[in-house]
Image: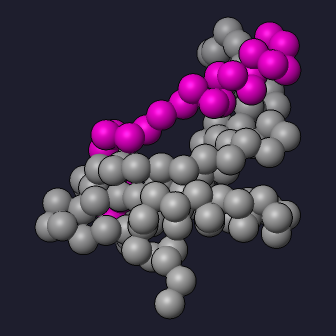
Amino acid sequence: MTDEEKRLALEELDFVGREVFCTQKGDWSTRRTRHLFGTVEGEVQLIVDDVRHIIQRILKPGGDVFYRTCYHTWESRVRKNRAKLQIGYGQFPSLLASKHQAKLLNMARLKGWEAFQTY
């Protein structure tokens, strides 16, 4: 797969409408119970090098709105029992240059997301 094909695959990812699940903190059972957190209502993305940086707007069932920063990138190795490389997901802080961070936050502001409006 060429670099251009990998970039296109990252650009085509779309999680709007997908449900977001979480596990209960402190649940140490062997099969932790997943709980519905909400639904991805919108997202903005910026691809820098081989990483798709995202801010997702998540709507909880009660109507509250949450924002999640995350990223997708191509994994560096083929996982066990897989035939090819996959796109991996990360939810922990990724490093983003200030000019790119400003661009991503501006995209969210232009969508009208209240958390990103200046006061």
Q: From this viewpoint, which residue is outermost toward the left? A: 62
Q: Quadrant of residue 25?
A: bottom left
At which x and y percent is residue 91? 59, 56
Q: Residue at x 14, y 67 (%)?
A: 62
Judging depth in this view, the residue of 34 and 18 nearest the camera is 18
25 vs 56: above or below: below
Q: Quadrant of the N terminus?
A: top right
Q: Residue at x 52, y 61 (%)?
A: 110
In this rendering, does residue 36 appear at all?
A: yes
At which x and y percent is residue 50? 80, 37
Judging depth in this view, the residue of 118 and 36 nearest the camera is 118
Residue 88: in magenta span: no
Q: Quadrant of residue 52?
A: top right
Relative to residue 69, is residue 18 drawn left or right? left
Relative to residue 13, is residue 35 drawn left or right? left
In this rendering, does residue 92 appear at all?
A: no
Q: Quadrant of residue 73?
A: top right
Judging depth in this view, the residue of 116 and 64 nearest the camera is 116
Residue 6: in magenta span: yes
- Way the structure is coloured: one colour
Judging depth in this view, the residue of 69 and 108 nearest the camera is 108
Relative to residue 107, is residue 115 drawn left or right? left
At which x and y percent is residue 28? 39, 63
Q: Residue at x 65, y 22 (%)?
A: 9
Query: How many marks overall?
Result: 0
14 vs 4: above or below: below
At which x and y percent is residue 53? 66, 50
| Magenta-highlighted residues | 1-24
